[in-house]
Image: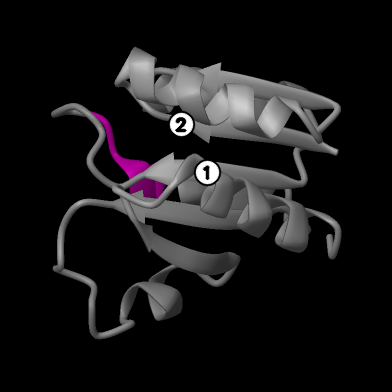
């Protein structure tokens, strides 16, 4: 299984990558929306984990839209530190979305979600 983490906080992305790499064949990191789109164009990911709080100018939704267009079987997991989408409306915006998890979730919990949804794609 191949997984992409879209996160501009390098330390956090590395923590997630280390936990995922224990069980997953390939885990890549993209620090921006443009980098993520380039990686999705070149690699058939099973799961893309996207931080909804990317740096200003980067749109996590545009990454998800591109994933939907380019890799329709890919699953998306959003990570957020906001309560803006707590009503579940984000699931209607991103059809491939399988989970919306708090940014303070443990890396083990995130890894379990990635493995669960990645094995279903």
> Which region of the structure is painted magenta?
58-63
- Quarter location, residue 87: bottom left
- Nearer to me, 95 or 113: 113
Q: Do tag 2 and tag 1 residues touch (Cβ < 8 Å)? A: yes
Residue beneath label 1, please? 49
Disc 2 packing (10 Å; few <14; some 14–19; many ≥20): many
62 is within the stretch colored magenta: yes
Predominant secondary structure, magenta span: helix
Horizontal relation, residue 14 to residue 81: left or right: right
Residue 118 horizontal/vertical position (percent): 77, 54
- Nearer to me, 34 or 54: 54
Residue 85 horizontal/vertical position (percent): 23, 72
Horizontal relation, residue 115 to residue 98: left or right: right
Q: Which residue is drawn at 54% across and 54% down?
A: 109
Does residue 27 show up?
yes
Mark 2 vs mark 1: which is more N-terminal? 2
Q: In which quarter of the image is the C terminus?
A: bottom right
Q: Which residue is drawn at 39% across and 61% down?
A: 101
Q: Which residue is drawn at 26% across and 33% down?
A: 54
Provide the secondary structure element on which disc 2 rests: strand
Residue beneath label 2, please? 6
């Amino acid at each position: 299984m191949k997984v992409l983490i879209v996160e501009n906080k390098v330390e956090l992305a590395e923590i997630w990558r280390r936990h995922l790499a224990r069980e997953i064949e390939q885990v890549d990191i993209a620090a921006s929306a443009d980098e993520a789109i380039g990686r999705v164009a070149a690699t058939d990911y099973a799961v893309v984990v996207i931080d909804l709080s990317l740096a200003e100018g980067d749109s996590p939704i545009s990454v998800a839209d591109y994933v939907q267009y380019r890799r329709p079987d890919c699953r998306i997991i959003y990570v957020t530190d906001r309560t803006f989408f707590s009503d579940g409306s984000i699931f209607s915006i991103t059809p491939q979305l399988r989970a919306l998890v708090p940014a303070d979730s443990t890396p083990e919990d995130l890894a379990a979600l990635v493995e669960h949804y990645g094995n279903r794609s």
